[in-house]
Image (cartoon, rainbow, N blue to C red):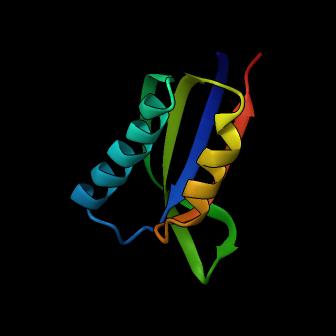
Amino acid sequence: MRSYELVFILQPELDDTAVEGLVEKVKGWITEAGGTVSKIDRWGKRRLAYPINKRREGQYILFDMNMPPAFSSELERNLRFQEQVMRFLIVNRD
């Protein structure tokens, strides 16, 4: 198991239930793969440094997690298919 950070930016017009549903979905993917989520930090709506798909704001979510290294590519693939996710970044903390 390796320690990772995942930050993703969601569309700004999503309501709280949609954001919470997506957070739980991502957490479920990680736990199903044998990983653990130690912290979920919701930064809220922030202004973007540059427009993404003609949007100036996004909702930021940070995950601190431990997961098998082989699952990172699968997690990236799953996040790419989510329409609500505008950008994401997975960083190895080791």
Name the residue at the bottom extreme.
54
The residue drawn where x is 56% and y is 50% is 8
Name the residue at the left extreme.
17
Position of the C terminus, as image quadrant, is: top right
Position of the N terminus, as image quadrant, is: top right
Image position, residue 3 (x, y; %) = 65, 19
Position of 19 with respect to 51 (left or right) is left
Position of 66 with respect to 42 (left or right) is right
**Is residue 81 positioned above or below 8 on the image?**
below
Position of 91 with respect to 71 (left or right) is right
The residue drawn where x is 41% and y is 37% is 27
Image position, residue 71 (x, y; %) = 64, 36
Q: Quadrant of residue 19?
A: bottom left
**Is residue 49 positioned above or below 54 on the image?**
above
Q: In which quarter of the image is residue 43?
A: top left
Front-lying residue, 33 or 11? 33
Front-lying residue, 57 or 26? 26
Q: In which quarter of the image is residue 42?
A: top left
Image position, residue 59 (x, y; %) = 46, 56
Image position, residue 4 (x, y; %) = 65, 26
The residue drawn where x is 43% and y is 29% is 31
The residue drawn where x is 56% and y is 56% is 79
